[in-house]
Image (spheres, grey):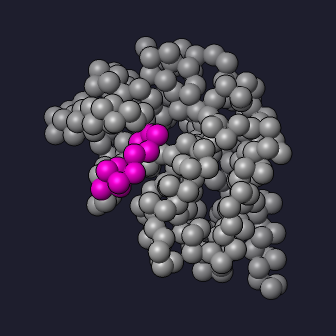
């Protein structure tokens, strides 16, 4: 019990940085992604180490709810926040937790006057869910049924990404940085990204190209039909909400 209280107490020191996701055509912010910060301050080597510890202590869901509230509360401090979306990374191992229940996120959103359609959960295939009868499809279907937006993160680098895409059509897929890095010089990457974009468009799914760092990468992604972009070229993640201006063009300084 002492370990549990001590671990949960550490959450107070954690913070979120926001990184804009921008519409490549209007050049305005479509969303911000919440990225956890300060885990090293509380004694963890990485974010993965922190969440693995929470999982093994059986506290993953309790921790995640505290972090969701922290992210949502900070999101509402952004100017014009109601006009954009909040992307939040969801660890699908939540289903393994004994205290996993439904309705908590909706209650949080109501408390902060945020529409359910504003929140987009990012899911990756980093972890398997072990609870019998459940899996990543289950958690996707649950949150989709509840009215939340769903995004598949790191698309293209996992072994089951296309199978997941087939079995559950998300609202958004995020093309992993691996395929964006060097796309200007690598015709194979260009062909793969182009086909992912065309497939997604045919199924009515939005595309985010992650890790844009060069203007040439931005131009190639635009030429291939990508709608949304994210990366250091647009803006680095920042814990200072005043650095993010949601009511103006974010790409105004990019040619």
Is 7 located above or below residue 158 in the figure? Answer: below
Q: Is residue 167 magenta?
A: yes
Is 98 located above or below residue 252 in the figure? Answer: below
Report which quarter residue 3 is drawn in.
bottom right
Report which quarter residue 217 is drawn in.
top left
Q: Which residue is drawn at 60% across and 44% down?
A: 147
Q: Is residue 96 visible?
A: yes
Task: State which region is magenta.
Answer: 163-173
Query: Looking at the image, which is closer to me, 36 or 60?
Result: 60
Q: Where is residue 27 in the image (x, y as percent from the top left)?
A: 51, 18
Q: Which residue is drawn at 75% across and 45% down?
A: 109
Q: Which residue is drawn at 30% across and 56% down?
A: 163
Q: Residue at x 80, y 76 (%)?
A: 6
Q: Hey, which residue is sitting farthest bottom in the picture?
A: 1
Q: Is residue 225 left or right of residue 29?
A: left
Q: Position of residue 175 (x, y in %)?
A: 37, 42
Q: Position of residue 114 (x, y in %)?
A: 74, 38
Q: Is residue 37 left or right of residue 46?
A: right
Q: Is residue 111 left or right of residue 245?
A: right
Is 103 located above or below residue 177 in the figure? Answer: below
């Amino acid at each position: 019990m002492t370990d549990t209280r001590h671990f949960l107490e550490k959450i107070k020191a954690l913070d979120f940085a926001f990184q804009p996701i921008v519409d490549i055509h209007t050049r305005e912010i479509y969303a911000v992604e919440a990225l956890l910060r300060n885990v090293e301050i509380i004694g963890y080597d990485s974010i993965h180490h922190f969440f693995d510890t929470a999982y093994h202590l059986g506290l993953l869901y309790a921790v995640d709810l505290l972090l969701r509230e922290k992210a949502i509360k900070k999101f509402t401090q952004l100017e014009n926040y109601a006009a954009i979306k909040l992307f939040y990374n969801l660890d699908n191992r939540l289903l393994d937790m004994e205290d996993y229940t439904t309705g908590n996120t909706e209650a949080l959103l109501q408390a902060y006057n945020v529409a359910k359609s504003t929140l987009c959960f990012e899911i990756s295939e980093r972890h398997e869910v072990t609870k019998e009868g459940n899996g990543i499809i289950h958690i996707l279907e649950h949150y989709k049924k509840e009215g939340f937006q769903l995004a598949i993160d790191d698309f293209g680098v996992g072994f089951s990404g296309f199978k997941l895409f087939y079995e559950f059509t998300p609202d958004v897929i995020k093309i992993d940085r691996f395929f964006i890095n060097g796309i200007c010089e690598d015709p194979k990457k260009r062909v793969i990204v182009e086909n992912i974009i065309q497939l997604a468009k045919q199924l009515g799914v939005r595309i985010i190209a992650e890790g844009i760092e060069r203007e040439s990468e931005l131009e190639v992604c635009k030429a291939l039909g990508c709608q949304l972009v994210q990366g250091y070229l647009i803006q680095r993640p920042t814990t200072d909400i005043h650095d993010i201006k949601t009511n103006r063009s974010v790409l105004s300084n990019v040619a």
